[in-house]
Amino acid sequence: MFEQMDAVSHRYEELSVRLSQPETVADSVRFCALMKEYRTLGPVVEAYRAYEKAKDHLAQAEALLAEASDPDFKQMIQQELCENRQAVTQREQELKVLLLPRDAGDGKDVILEIRAGAGGEEAALFAHSLFRMYAMYAQRHGWQLELISENDTELGGVKEAVLSIGGENVYNRLKYESGVHRVQRVPETETQGRIHTSTATVAVMPQAEEVDFALDRKDLRIDTFRSSGAGGQHINKTSSAIRITHLPTGMVVECQNERSQFQNKDKALEVLRSHLLAQKQQAQQDALNSTRQGQVGSGGRSEKIRTYNFPQDRVTDHRAGLTLHNIESVMDGGLDDLLDTLAAQEQQRKLQALDAANGKDL
């Protein structure tokens, strides 16, 4: 598994030199690309160095033990040998984790879609709560959030919202949010204090660029219309909103939140490419539910990845088997405990598969 590490270390050193050269610094695009690679390789190289150092210490202790004759000295070396073996095992495990294959979209920004499911107006209000939760989570991590389209209700709910979120490791973190989210609470519209159950669906797709998925303009029908909702007189008086239909699949996307028709068109194309790329990835590997349909199901009450129970101050992630009793903190963007658990479980599954494939032998 570690056969390529010397080459990786050499590449890391090469990047360090190239990033300090004036001609590289002058080319901002090239500099950013090399810096991204350098940052990716950094933790791997550091872990490999720590692993090699632990192996050297173990070899030295084994050599001392072979030469030792004094019983007390041998006992001391044996203790050190035990500690060194544990250190090698630990460093080896850390390196294996870093070398696990990553999802193709892990380094990408995301298109995140939220849609009200079962539950009428309460489902729309819950969808708005999820919108707020992700916005606050993005803010905590210093990510950039941009609203592409929104269809709201008179009571402040959201029938559907499409967001673009950019930053470091966005898809790597948010990919676990795809699915049906269920809420149990007394709705604002309830007059008798009864607890209602509603759902909203979330789809998270890596943001596709033209290089990832090229669109044939002959396959597109592009319509303009007047934006609805908030936005001021300019938006409401001009046909700046864009609706794009992908004719081969019938997929429709809209964008109306930008003031310019051209900006709305670019954003809509961005969303469409992301949908189509996710669809293509599912066709290539059905086990990965990458498309929105596969991620969110039908939106019924029986399908769920997480339940938010307000009366019991409880959030339960059904995949992780984890329950937290701090629902207000979660709804304010405190998702890290949930996402860390899901990431750790995925990591463990990959390690088990790797050990099985390698016969537990590096």
Image (cartoon, rainbow, N blue to C red):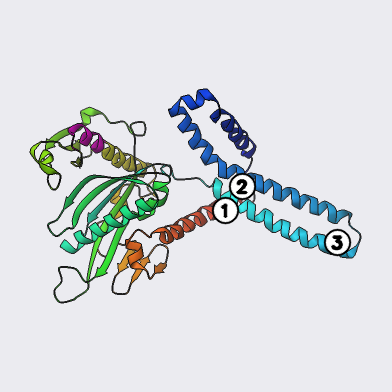
Q: Earlier in the sequence, mark 3 or mark 2?
A: 2
Q: Is residue 122 above or below residue 31?
A: below
> Does 264 appear in magenta?
yes
Q: How dense is the environment of label 1, judged by Cα within 10 Å: few (below 14), some, or many (20 and up)?
A: few
From the image, tell me which residue sits under label 3. 74
Name the residue at 61% across, 33% down. Answer: 13
The alpha-carbon separation of the residues under discs 1 and 3 comes to 37 Å
Nearest the viewer among 149 and 88 is 149
From the image, tell me which residue sits under label 1. 356
Farthest right residue? 69
Mark 1 or 2, which is nearer the eye? Answer: 2
Q: How dense is the environment of label 3, judged by Cα within 10 Å: few (below 14), some, or many (20 and up)?
A: some
Q: Which residues are magenta?
A: 259-269
Mark 1 or 3, which is nearer the eye? Answer: 3
Disc 3 element = helix
Predominant SS along the magenta part: helix
Name the residue at 59% across, 29% down. Answer: 17
Q: Earlier in the sequence, mark 1 or mark 3?
A: 3
Residue 184 image label: none
Q: Is residue 297 visible?
A: no
Q: Position of residue 188 (x, y in %)?
A: 17, 68
From the image, tell me which residue sits under label 2. 47
Disc 2 element = helix
Disc 1 element = helix
- The kind of residue on which mark 1 rests is Ala
Name the residue at 14% across, 36% down. Answer: 240
